[in-house]
Amino acid sequence: MMDRIGIHWFRLDLRLNDNPALYKLSKEVDTIIPIYIYEENIEIGKASKCWLEKSLESLDNELSKFDSKLYVFKGNPKKIIHKIIEDKKILCFTWNRLYDKHSIRRDKEIKSFLHKKAIVCNTYNGYLLSEPWEVRNKSGNFFKVFTPFWKANFERLLNKEKLLSLSNKYKFYKKNINSVLKIDELKLNVPRKEWMDRMLSYWDIGENAAKLKLKKFINKKLYNYSTGRDRPDTDFTSKISPHLHFGEISPLRIFTEVMKSNIEEKNKTKYLSEIGWRDFSYNLLFYYPEMTELPIQSKFEKFPWQRDKKNLITWKKGKTGIPIVDAGMKELYEIGWMHNRVRMIVGSFLTKNLLLHWKEGERWFFDTLVDADIGSNSAGWQWIAGSGADASPYFRIFNPILQGKKFDPKGEYVRQFIPSLDKIPEKFIHSPWEMTVEEQEKYNFVLGRDYPKPIVDLSYTRRRALDAFKKISE
Ligand SMILES: Cc1cc2nc3c(=O)[nH]c(=O)nc-3n(C[C@H](O)[C@H](O)[C@H](O)COP(=O)(O)OP(=O)(O)OC[C@H]3O[C@@H](n4cnc5c(N)ncnc54)[C@H](O)[C@@H]3O)c2cc1C
């Protein structure tokens, strides 16, 4: 009898474990062809490209343990899939669902195309704890506010099915397929090799690394998460965001492992609620598909954003003269990641003190974050700009000096990323411009030479932002 062959299309689910689509396919067919298609016309940031290449290599390596490989293609998915199914007799096709408008449109088209060719096409949730349509309020509408959203989601999850684990019975395809590329032929690594190598040196990439990171986080950091998570000068968050973004680990595994752990309830629930914010971001993206470009609150369409290329570049380079902002921007460029508290501080500074459009910040983050994610990034930026669904009220403008003093009290985070401030005493680390000339001399420090003067006056720009907001609210 002929082998029944199926195809699993890997997208943002670059793992073999807890992969519902892959698992279910293995029950339908004898042999699975694991494919990945790199779509050139989909925007992907430089840092993400670097991560993607390593993640694909890692998945390919896992598949080699089954004497198979990842069949990699480049181009238009519909055309590529058309070609593969013309060459081979395919019974069934699977993928895990995505929720942005481009993916939804593309997937619908491919699904109906496969149906016309009499190929069964099944899709699953492998990316979120719950899909947007599964969490609704009592009147059947979607949630616009996080707290009730998470309450309903959490209750639903407590009754959810168990994790799926890798079945040893997986049998992957071994023969050649036309037009398959080697991973390095995708040319994902970027010209700035030095930057890329440095950034990647901070990370272990792939499914096994992600599982190990979760284990270590639960054993060593989770016990202090609810207070430690806000302190960029300590290391109490999980740094699992890029692994989650690329689907090297499933949110359901995180939920299950955290729930199983013997850690105090308040830390477990706080951590899981952060994973809940990720679901909430996708809930928003699904119901406001234009939120990557347009403000969720339409009154922000007439907000008087400024255009100031010089200030934007200064912000990107971490040379604003506000230490906690600059440290964050340097961390981003160095590691491809930034602490959540600092993402909020630099975001508030850009959109409120500099009055630059949140989209400018979102674009820079998208290019430089290894966890750059269409849902969480646009939701994060709309939240901090005040234009989101459950946004921080506009008048809550972060004071970066107070934020620094509260969350980096000794200035250790600032010193780590801005060595030229190392010699400054704690008292001035978040506001070096307050030092007198004598004090500067005492510490062999010259403002304007060793570190820039602030590019804006924080009190004046705060008032300016509030005035601008008042105008669009009238
Ligand atoms: C302006 C701005 C932009 C952001 N852009 C992104 C982005 O592109 N990609 C991204 O994954 N996160 C983004 N976030 C959310 C958050 O900053 C990161 O998820 C978090 O810092 C990742 O570090 P961690 O894994 O150590 O987090 P932990 O504190 O360990 O949290 C665990 C996981 O929960 C999720 N999570 C935590 N906080 C949030 C949040 N506020 N929104 C959505 N999910 C959250 C992440 O998946 C994270 O990995 C953004 C936040 C802001 C304010």
Image (cartoon, rainbow, N blue to C red):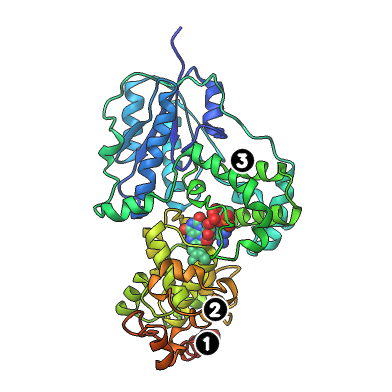
- Any mark on residue 466, and which? 1
Q: Residues within 10 Å of mark 2 (few under 14, many from 20)?
A: some
Q: Can residue 288 be spotted in the picture?
A: no
Q: Which of these two is toward me, 148 or 243?
A: 243
On screen, residue 246 versus residue 260, left or right, reads: left
Residue shown at 48% from the left, 79% from the top: 429
Residue shown at 43% from the left, 70% from the top: 327
Q: In the rendered view, would you say 182 is above or below 199?
A: above
Q: Earlier in the sequence, mark 1 or mark 2?
A: 2
Q: Nearer the viewer, mark 1 or mark 2?
A: 2
Residue shown at 46% from the left, 72% from the top: 346
Q: Earlier in the sequence, mark 3 or mark 2?
A: 3
- Any mark on residue 253, and which? 3
**Mark 2 residue type:** Phe
Q: Position of residue 277 (x, y in %)?
A: 60, 58
Label 3 residue near ligand 1, CB within 8 Å:
no
Whether residues under marks 3 and 2 lie with C-beta atoms below 8 angstroms apart, the answer is: no
